[in-house]
Amino acid sequence: MISTSDFRTGLTIEIEGEIYTITDFQHVKPGKGAAFVRTRLKNIRSGSVTERTFRAGEKVERALMERRPMQFLYVAGDDFYFMDTESFEQLTINREQLGNDTKFLKENMDIAVVLYQDQVIGTELPTAVELTVTDTEPGIKGDTASGGSKPATLETGLVVQVPFFISVGDVLRIDTRSGEYIERV
C-alpha cells in the first residue's frame, strides 16, 4: 500500500481490480476544506484515460509490474513467439495483445515483456528499430532530402512516409513511439 503523497508520474497502481499508470497528478490544498490529490490515470489493459480525485493521505494498492528481457523468435498465424533470454522458456503472445507493436518486430529482436501476476500486459520496444524497404516508387533524378515525401513499405508491412531519395533495399531507422522515419542507415 502506498499513500497519495508517494504518487509520481509512471507509478502503477491497482484500483478495483484494474491496473492504472499515473500520467499526471496534482496536490491541491484549497483555502477551505481538506487537501486532495487530482490524478489522470491510464488503464494499462484498455488504454482508456480517466481522472480521479483522492483524499490526501489515502492509501492505494501498488501494482508491481515485472519486465522480462525476451527475444522475438517468429510468428505463426496470429501468435508471436518469444524466448526468455534468462531461462530460455518460450512465451506465446497473440496479435491482439501486442497491438501496433507487431509492425516493428523483427526476428531475433530483443524487447522487454511487461507482466503483472504472470499475465502479459504489453511490451516495451526499443525507441528506434532498423527496417529494410521492400516496396516504394523509384526516385527521380534531382530529388532532395527536403523535397517532399512518398510512401514506403517496410519488411514488417509497416508503411511510412520517406524522402524521395529512398529506394528499395535501403535500411531505415524508424521511431517506434510515433512510427515515423528518422534516417537512412
Image (cartoon, rainbow, N blue to C red):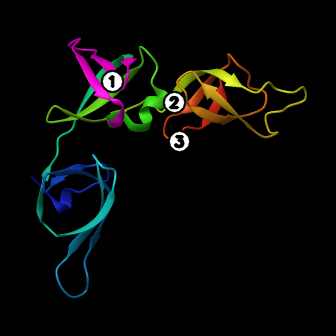
Q: Nearer the viewer, mark 1 or mark 3?
A: 1
Task: Give the SS element for disc 1.
Answer: strand
Residue 24 visible in the snapshot: no
To which residue does mark 3 refer? Answer: 178
| 79, above or below 88, in the image | below
Residue 30 visible in the snapshot: yes
Residue type highlighted by circle 2? Ala
Gap in angstroms between the C-alphas marked 1 and 2:
23 Å
- Callout 1 touching callout 2 (CB < 8 Å): no
User: Is residue 154 on the magenta stretch?
Assistant: no
Q: Residue at x 42, y 33 (%)?
A: 101
Task: Give the SS element for disc 2.
Answer: strand
To which residue does mark 2 refer? Answer: 128
User: For the view shown, which residue lies furthest in the bottom direction?
Assistant: 32
Which of the numbered marks, if any, corresponds to residue 69? none
Pick whichever of labels 1 and 2 is earlier in the sequence: 1
Gap in angstroms between the C-alphas marked 1 and 3:
24 Å
Closer-to-camera residue (90/177): 90
The C terminus: image quadrant:
top right
Q: Quadrant of residue 116?
A: top left
Gap in angstroms between the C-alphas marked 2 and 3:
10 Å
Q: Residue at x 78, y 31 (%)?
A: 164
Q: Residue at x 30, y 63 (%)?
A: 50
| 108, above or below 99, in the image | above
Which of the numbered marks, if any, corresponds to residue 79? 1
* Label 1 CA crowd tier, 10 Å (few <14, some 14–19, many 20+): some
Residue type highlighted by circle 1? Asp
Pick whichever of labels 1 and 3 is earlier in the sequence: 1
Q: Which residues are magenta?
A: 75-96
| 39, above or below 143, in the image | below
Query: Residue 178, percent across and down?
Result: 53, 42
